[in-house]
Amino acid sequence: MTTHVLILCTHNSARSVLSEGMLNHLAARLGKDVKAHSAGSAPSGRVNPFAIEALNNAGIDTSSYRSKCWDEFSRDGAPPLSIVITVCDSAAAEQCPVFFGGTGGLIMGLLISTGLISAISSMVWAGPRVTQVMGEDVRLLRVLSTKNANGVPHVSLGFQYLLVVGLIITSTFDSIVNYIGFILSLSAFMTVTGVFVLRLTEPQLSRPYRVWGYPVTPLVFLAVTGWMMFFVVRQRPMVLVAGAVTLAAGLVVYFLNRAFSPSVVAAPTASTVPTSRL
């Protein structure tokens, strides 16, 4: 059975055409039953002559190549696609036609909706309670720890609601997803880094649970997470700016809380009192 691969870009004039030609060329040389196609969300109507020249120099026949719209692959009689690849950010961010048929689109829509509903429901329950605990621990945020007669952290719930509405009004869905993903990845990266810091600075601490495979497993996690964050920042630098502002705001609250919170001095115990005073 032939594996049909569709390669997308915005204008379908250069990168996607080059990819189509090279993939078909390699598949033929290796004897693989693979057929590549290319299309664009806003086709220019002409293939870049330098792309044609590069393919011809590689011995690839380009007589049938043309710039075409991706809608051709969602119509009846279109080849059944196994893989869809985007080679530019603008095409990746657009809403694509249904390439895998109505049934496939329905199944994927139900799976995505189920996942989103469960994730949103869990955050509605967990989010305000995390904020409530922050209010209990941080004096400057004490108002967030307020609960009503039923034990619901209604102030934290309202605060979360205002944050969500603010993000929706001031940004796009794609930007919000990238921002939240970057912040979560950064938080996880710093948390796992803390494992190494504590192992070096507090080796005497009791550790009922020790990280399996230390130090290999946390190093692998840090490498993968770091690579993901680097890729996001390189593609969308403003995500780094938003993340830095969020982190800076957290640091300001932390240091202000330390400055205005009363110091707690531990009472002396028998083990800390000099023997000359016993």
Image: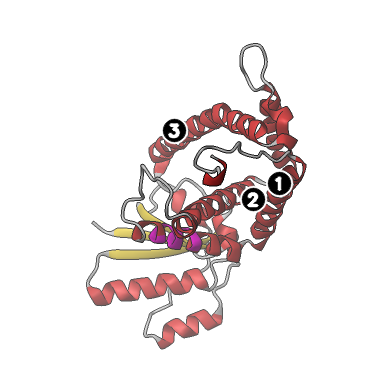
Residue bearing mark 3: 110
The dominant secondary structure in magenta is helix
3D distance between C-alphas at marks 3 and 1? 26 Å
Q: Residue 171: give its label.
A: 1
Q: Earlier in the sequence, mark 2 or mark 3?
A: 3
The correct choice, above or below, for 140 with respect to 258 in the image is above
The correct choice, above or below, for 227 with respect to 262 in the image is below
Q: Nearer the viewer, residue 25 or 259?
A: 259
Q: Residue 104: give its label.
A: none
Q: Residue shown at 54%/83% (left/top)? A: 50
Span shown in magenta? 219-226
**Residue 162 visible:** no
Q: Quadrant of the N terminus?
A: bottom left
Q: Residue shown at 59%/47% (left/top)? A: 180
Residue bearing mark 2: 175
Asked which quadrant contains residue 169, the reply is top right
Q: Position of residue 148 (x, y in %)?
A: 67, 15
3D distance between C-alphas at marks 2 and 1? 6 Å
